[in-house]
Amino acid sequence: MSKPINRIIKQLGEDLLQKLNGLTASDFHSFMLEAFRARTDQLRPPDMLRSYAGNRFAKPSELDPVSYHQLEAELLASARQQDIQPVLLSPVAPLGNCASHGAVDQNKVLSASRGTEVLADSTNMMATIAADRIKQGLWNHDEGVHLCSTHRVMRAQQFQGPGTFAHFGIYGMVSVGKAKGSYQCEASLLGKQLGYYQRLFRSRFSAELSVTLQQRGGYTDGGGFLARMADIIQAQLPEAAIAIQEPNQTNSYYQGINFKLFMTGPHGKTEIGDGGFVDWTQTMLGNAKERCLISGIGLDRLMMMEL
């Protein structure tokens, strides 16, 4: 535990956390709502101005909003034309939606009340939506189903450098399917997503896609899986440059491979996004045959490249 938490526990009682964790979800939410209400009852309008001045989470982006939303619309419209379903996400996710998958430490997420957190990763929210639709029998995803979204996500960690904010825009994709043997499902999902990015980079930015692959754990024949995915990219996107990094088995959530996306164009070569296979739908649905591929590119970075 951190020093501030140790100090608070020493002041209020050693069993404070144990008592709070022992509450039912409903009672905990009621307690937190009352704590927030009591705190805000003490605040006045001048306090809001002082709070805003020192609150990095509340500051607006410096990007042009009209151009930003035009870019969002272009990306989503292009995705829909390629049978990738756009989703308009809620600003919040269920509490623990990132941490439960090992994607982001909860201390890097803006936790909220009523069992929610401010959305910190659009891909695991779309994976949750996909798993829910599969569980309800609303989807036949044997041949693959693809979702996408644009969203400003919020992260609690401190970012360094000029023009950096606690919130930033992401275009994210989630593709789900069922294993068929010989990595056919994975090949189909990967080809779909990378094909979208290649067409986007060419049509919108007059740039070419290049991909760096890295082997991860989770597959028995990890080297064979990596080679198969590299062959798929080369066959379906012959003009995309492919590089292989040294294997990394320590990643907490990518399965088999992950990849980095680079755009090479008038501004040179720029890293613009990443992705990989995850076990999120497997673990949520309790089905080892489920396959899930996620990826995302930074909208703020795309915008700044056009300035």
Image: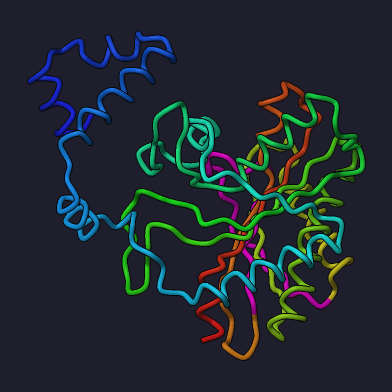
**What percent of the width, then of the height, locates residue 93?**
53, 37
Observer-nearest of 72 and 287:
72
- On whether residue 250 falls in the magenta region, the answer is yes
Residue 213 lies in quadrant:
bottom right
Furthest toward the left, the residue is: 11
Above or below 194: residue 29: above
**What percent of the width, then of the height, locates residue 155?**
41, 50
Left or right: residue 298 versus residue 36 is: right
Visual colour scheme? rainbow
Residue at x 81%, y 55% (from the top left corner): 84
Residue at x 86%, y 64% (from the top left corner): 81
Q: Would residue 14 be visible to someone looking at this image?
A: yes
Left or right: residue 177 versus residue 279 is: right
**What percent of the width, then of the height, locates residue 199?**
79, 73
Above or below 137: residue 63: below
Q: Quadrant of the N terminus?
A: top left
Furthest toward the front, the residue is: 45
Above or below 82: residue 223: above
**What percent of the width, then of the height, locates residue 47?**
16, 50
Residue at x 52%, y 30% (from the top left corner): 100
Observer-nearest of 157 and 215:
157
Q: Would residue 257 be visible to someone looking at this image?
A: no
Residue at x 41%, y 42% (from the top left corner): 109
Left or right: residue 298 versus residue 34 is: right
Q: What span is in magenta?
A: 239-263
How many marks can you see?
0
Left or right: residue 30 versus residue 269 is: left
